[in-house]
Amino acid sequence: MERLRIDKWLWAARFYKTRSLACDEIVKGRIQVNGQDAKPSREVKADDTVVIRQGPVIRTITVLGISPHRGPAPVAQQLYAETPDSIRHREQAAEQRRLGTEPAQTIEHGRPTKRDRRDIEKAINTSMDS
Protein backbone atom coordinates (compact mmCIF):
# COMPACT_ATOMS: atom_id res chain seq x y z
CA MET A 1 0.00 0.00 0.00
CA GLU A 2 1.59 3.24 -1.11
CA ARG A 3 -1.13 5.81 -0.23
CA LEU A 4 -3.44 6.21 2.75
CA ARG A 5 -6.04 8.72 3.92
CA ILE A 6 -4.51 11.36 6.20
CA ASP A 7 -7.02 10.69 9.00
CA LYS A 8 -6.13 6.99 9.03
CA TRP A 9 -2.42 7.75 8.90
CA LEU A 10 -2.58 10.22 11.82
CA TRP A 11 -4.48 7.61 13.82
CA ALA A 12 -2.05 4.80 12.90
CA ALA A 13 0.96 7.01 13.71
CA ARG A 14 -0.61 7.67 17.13
CA PHE A 15 -0.98 11.44 16.85
CA TYR A 16 -4.67 11.07 17.77
CA LYS A 17 -6.43 8.44 19.82
CA THR A 18 -9.31 7.94 17.39
CA ARG A 19 -9.92 8.55 13.71
CA SER A 20 -12.83 10.83 14.54
CA LEU A 21 -10.52 13.06 16.63
CA ALA A 22 -8.10 13.17 13.70
CA CYS A 23 -10.97 14.10 11.35
CA ASP A 24 -12.09 16.88 13.70
CA GLU A 25 -8.60 18.39 13.81
CA ILE A 26 -8.29 18.17 10.02
CA VAL A 27 -11.66 19.88 9.51
CA LYS A 28 -10.62 22.64 11.93
CA GLY A 29 -7.63 23.37 9.67
CA ARG A 30 -4.94 22.24 12.08
CA ILE A 31 -3.35 19.80 9.64
CA GLN A 32 -1.51 20.72 6.45
CA VAL A 33 -0.04 18.36 3.86
CA ASN A 34 2.71 19.76 1.64
CA GLY A 35 1.76 23.34 2.58
CA GLN A 36 -1.96 22.97 1.82
CA ASP A 37 -4.87 22.57 4.21
CA ALA A 38 -5.95 18.95 4.19
CA LYS A 39 -9.32 17.25 4.08
CA PRO A 40 -9.86 13.93 5.89
CA SER A 41 -9.92 12.07 2.56
CA ARG A 42 -6.58 13.55 1.44
CA GLU A 43 -4.10 10.78 0.72
CA VAL A 44 -0.53 10.85 1.96
CA LYS A 45 2.44 8.95 0.66
CA ALA A 46 6.06 8.56 1.70
CA ASP A 47 8.11 11.81 1.63
CA ASP A 48 5.05 14.03 2.16
CA THR A 49 5.42 16.83 4.70
CA VAL A 50 2.68 17.10 7.31
CA VAL A 51 2.33 20.08 9.65
CA ILE A 52 0.36 19.32 12.82
CA ARG A 53 -0.75 22.05 15.22
CA GLN A 54 -1.56 20.67 18.66
CA GLY A 55 -2.33 23.57 20.96
CA PRO A 56 0.67 25.93 21.04
CA VAL A 57 2.95 23.26 19.54
CA ILE A 58 3.48 23.05 15.79
CA ARG A 59 5.15 19.85 14.58
CA THR A 60 6.56 19.37 11.09
CA ILE A 61 6.62 15.70 10.16
CA THR A 62 7.99 13.84 7.15
CA VAL A 63 6.05 10.69 6.27
CA LEU A 64 8.40 7.69 6.10
CA GLY A 65 5.93 4.86 5.88
CA ILE A 66 2.29 3.93 5.49
CA SER A 67 0.37 1.59 7.76
CA PRO A 68 -3.39 1.10 7.71
CA HIS A 69 -3.27 -0.54 11.16
CA ARG A 70 -2.64 1.08 14.51
CA GLY A 71 0.22 -0.79 16.11
CA PRO A 72 2.40 -0.34 19.17
CA ALA A 73 4.12 3.00 19.75
CA PRO A 74 7.61 1.87 18.62
CA VAL A 75 6.15 0.72 15.30
CA ALA A 76 4.13 3.94 14.93
CA GLN A 77 7.25 6.06 15.48
CA GLN A 78 8.85 4.44 12.44
CA LEU A 79 6.11 5.86 10.22
CA TYR A 80 7.40 9.44 10.50
CA ALA A 81 10.40 11.62 11.24
CA GLU A 82 10.15 15.03 12.84
CA THR A 83 12.32 17.73 11.30
CA PRO A 84 15.19 19.13 13.41
CA ASP A 85 13.69 22.64 13.27
CA SER A 86 10.39 21.30 14.56
CA ILE A 87 12.10 19.48 17.43
CA ARG A 88 14.04 22.62 18.38
CA HIS A 89 10.91 24.83 18.29
CA ARG A 90 8.94 22.29 20.32
CA GLU A 91 11.68 22.12 22.98
CA GLN A 92 11.92 25.92 23.13
CA ALA A 93 8.15 26.20 23.58
CA ALA A 94 8.25 23.60 26.36
CA GLU A 95 11.06 25.51 28.08
CA GLN A 96 9.13 28.79 27.84
CA ARG A 97 6.05 27.16 29.33
CA ARG A 98 8.15 25.69 32.12
CA LEU A 99 9.80 29.03 32.92
CA GLY A 100 6.64 31.09 32.47
CA THR A 101 4.80 32.62 35.39
CA GLU A 102 1.92 30.84 37.00
CA PRO A 103 -1.27 32.85 36.35
CA ALA A 104 -2.55 32.18 39.86
CA GLN A 105 0.50 33.91 41.36
CA THR A 106 -0.47 37.24 39.78
CA ILE A 107 -3.70 37.34 41.81
CA GLU A 108 -3.09 39.47 44.88
CA HIS A 109 -6.33 38.71 46.58
CA GLY A 110 -8.59 35.73 46.22
CA ARG A 111 -12.33 35.68 46.59
CA PRO A 112 -13.76 38.01 49.21
CA THR A 113 -14.39 36.42 52.55
CA LYS A 114 -17.78 36.58 54.22
CA ARG A 115 -16.63 39.58 56.26
CA ASP A 116 -15.31 41.34 53.12
CA ARG A 117 -18.59 40.71 51.33
CA ARG A 118 -20.60 42.16 54.24
CA ASP A 119 -18.35 45.25 54.27
CA ILE A 120 -18.81 45.68 50.51
CA GLU A 121 -22.59 45.33 50.80
CA LYS A 122 -22.66 47.78 53.71
CA ALA A 123 -20.64 50.32 51.69
CA ILE A 124 -22.94 49.92 48.68
CA ASN A 125 -26.07 50.30 50.80
CA THR A 126 -24.77 53.43 52.57
CA SER A 127 -23.80 55.04 49.26
CA MET A 128 -27.28 54.33 47.85
CA ASP A 129 -28.98 55.79 50.94
CA SER A 130 -27.18 59.11 50.68
Image (cartoon, rainbow, N blue to C red):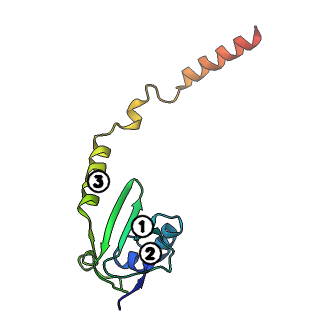
Which label sits in the foreground, 3 or 2?
Answer: 3
Query: Which of the numbered marks, if any, corresponds to residue 89?
Result: 3
Most extreme residue toward the top is 130
Eyeballing the image, is 68 above or below 22?
A: below
Which label sits in the foreground, 1 or 3?
Answer: 1
Q: Residue at x 65, y 20 (%)?
A: 121
Eyeballing the image, is 76 above or below 26?
A: below
Query: Which of the numbered marks, if any, corresponds to residue 18?
Result: 2
Image location (x, y in percent) of residue 111: 51, 30
Q: Nearer the viewer, residue 117 or 89?
A: 89
| Amino acid at the residue labelled 2 | Thr
Q: Nearer the viewer, residue 117 or 39?
A: 39
Q: Secondary structure at mark 3?
A: helix
Q: Which of pointers 3 and 2 lies earlier in the amino acid sequence?
A: 2
Image location (x, y in percent) of residue 62: 30, 72
Query: Which of the numbered marks, if any, corresponds to residue 35?
Result: 1
- Is mark 1 in CB contact (under 8 Å) with mark 3? no
| Amino acid at the residue labelled 1 | Gly
